[in-house]
Image (cartoon, rainbow, N blue to C red):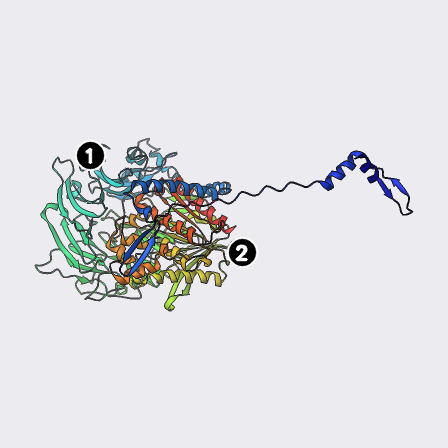
Amino acid sequence: MRNLLSSAAVSIHRDGSRRRLLIPTAQFILLVFHRSYKAPRQPTPPAPPKPPKPPQKPQTFTFHDATWDDPYSWMSKLSDAVARRHMDVLMEQEEKYTEAVMSGTEKLQSKLQTEMASRMQFDLSTPPVRWGPWLYYRRVEEGKQYSVLCRRLASLNEEFISNKSPFSGFDFTSGKRIEQKLVDYNQEAERFGGYAYEELSEVSPDHKFLAYTMYDKDNDYFKLCVRNLNSGALCSKPQADRVCNLAWAKGGRALLYVVTDQHKKPCRLYYSVIGSTDEDVLLLDEPQENVHMTIRHTKDFRFVSVNVFSMTSSKVFLINAADPLSGMTLVWECGAPVHCIVEHHRGYLYLFTDAAKEGRLVDHYYLLHSPVDASSGPRVWENVFHDDQDLIIEDVDFCDTHMVLIVREGWNYKLCALPLPLSSRKSGAVYLKELNPAFLPLPIYVSQISPGTNYDFYSSSMRFTISSPVMPDAVVDYDLSNGKWNIVQQQNMLHERTRILYGTSSSASSTGIFSDSLNSSSSHGVKSEDDIWNDLSEFYACERHFVSSHNEVMVPLTVVYSRMIENTKRNPGLLHGHGAYGELLDKRWRSELKSLLDRGWVLAYADVRGGGGQGKAWHHAGRSTKKLNSVKDYISCAKFLIEKEIVGEDKLAGWGSSAGGLLVAAAINHQPDLFRAAVLKARSLILCIDIHLCFFSVFIWLHIPVWFQVPFLDATSTLLYPIIPLTAADYEEFGYPGDKDDFHAIREYSPYDNIQNDAVYPAVLITSSYNTRFGVWEAAKWATRVRQQTIYDPNRPVLLHFSADIVEENRYMQCKEAALETAFLLKMMDS
């Protein structure tokens, strides 16, 4: 070392002389070691998390002329204890995998959850609904998870001056307590294992009792409860399990209810007298496997209608509500499963249906009427209106003085009122326009009009919810007697507040007078200088396109984006789709999606065939053997968004809820390179009843038990070997595997059976509740097979997220889940 230092510290000058360099010894040593030192290698980044690999247990199936293997069929064997244990382990592994993939987004999720929570109305009360002398409403107490059902006398409400804090329940002028608590669902949660999940809720017409059903999670059924509203106590009778329908009779002194069998098929109708010790009377029993029933009372409580339907027939019976034991009268029969609802008005029955006319299929609903006291012989039903392709009736509601119709011109919705009785009743059917209906004011870009409960049959005021892609839902009361209308509830997103009408002293109401002529209500709606609708079109643009699809069919595509964000032609986008059961695609403004809009995302809604909004033919063109039309429509809309540079290439995500999960998954199978990510959601009944928390249940008269709508990711097995019971409507929608043509169509569109080999799939997040009603095994099977057959890309994971909670009844969980889904999209899109 000494020699090295001595020689190294010598330099040679130009003249050849050798001179010692004046370098400090310590520095020189460092210099020498620096040249010889090799830096250690950077630590290898951790390997990306690997997805679970459940065991394969191949099983061969043969049906018709097809044979196939399913290595994961064991996942759906709920009766096999070993399979159940394996599924429990798999679900735990899936949750850990999702957490590992989403690690690093905790701050983002927290920020998103805070954003979304700030837009939720935690002190919200529903707008009071007047029925007789009472105002009914639900409210949420501070710090509580579930709502409280309350009422107050309408005569005292005008003195109630606290519009800002309606939940206080006091008249501050006199100090008198004017609120009556009927049901505290926080206490109900204690009775039902921590959950307060209500399906049905019916106040008796004498306002003395409340009949409602609560979900018993341990037994997986709904339990009937009847509460005395004067004392607040639960009645000892009737008590029943597996209840799916309710209707009051005898002015509130008796109750009719329908129970399901162990497979959740509505099969028996019972009659019970409140307070009686007698056994409940069985009025109707339908043990046949494919026969279902539903009941409802007419709005004047004069009759209870009983709909009995199967794959080959539909029947409507009428029960005299004053004497339910007097028997059932058949008033309507049809040789096919159809939608029909019966109302009564001053001695006439009205039937709203889409049944075939004279053996010919019809494309839209129509209205019939017939005298209640019809002469002996077959009942004769007459048309109320002539068919009019320019003004199509979508829905109808009644009060004692008026009939209100939801109509459609093309894809534009309108609301009109007619006085009753109709002047044309004795002269036969007329065109609706000839009666000069009064068209009610609507905002811009109406996507849906939903009737309220409107329980007070003798009130001239009727409530509707108006929905739009660029406007928070508006709950509107239309007074049909004087033409006045009020917005009684609507969230104001600009001021992060909600306006609710609680009495004449409220300054938040928006009023107007509606017109009597068709021309005065344009398709663009009504917008005053004060912007009374609180619409957000100044900040968010809404456009409608028509996309050429398979068979040269034009598919409506609605596009929403922020006007504040520049279109860089690289904007990420989210394409929604559903396309099943003839149901309208949900295009309502959703406050949680504002977080995407404000980050430059484009929201698009594809009204594909199989859905609603364009008649029965549009629905039939996308169901059963034609189900692939829905998929092709969705793909066409996705390509349109990219080709028109509305959404950037490799920046498109899909979104499918319930049956929309099948649509999006099938589209991914056809063109996986078209999508960068996707979210598939399972939805349950509560979301489909009434998003505005109305205190009564809205009667779902479509023959579809909504809780059976799950993402049919394994359509072949679900339809061929159903674990969750299916209805005639389910088989009509997705195909009956007993029919050979239907079976091959199912095999062709089923997402689980058509996963491409060695392809790169988009990132996918599937969310649901871990409950047998939602068929989680389908999601687990599809995700496992996608991972197995496609090219594994850790940047495009397939994730499962199953909550043990019933998310739809927990506002905190709703917000948390929405934040997770949004964070997933942002992470996968690197935006």
The magenta stretch is 49-56
Would you say residue 493 is visible in this rendering? no
Residue 416 drawn above or below residue 160: below
Q: Position of residue 447 (x, y in %)?
A: 37, 56
Spatial CA distance of label 1 from label 2 is 61 Å
- Residue 797 seen in the current view: yes
Q: Earlier in the sequence, mark 1 or mark 2?
A: 1
Left or right side of 774 for 495: right
The secondary structure that most of the magenta stretch takes on is loop
Q: Is residue 95 magenta?
A: no
Tag count in the figure? 2
Judging depth in this view, the residue of 712 and 167 nearest the camera is 712
Q: Residue at 45% of width from left, 41% of height from top?
A: 99
Dot 1 alpha-carbon crowd within 10 angstroms: few under 14, some 14 to 19, many 20 or more: some
The residue that label 2 is drawn on is 566
Quarter-of-image position of residue 252: top left
- Residue wearing tag 1: 235
Looking at the image, which residue is at 79% across and 37% down?
Answer: 28
Q: Nearer the viewer, residue 392 or 677?
A: 677
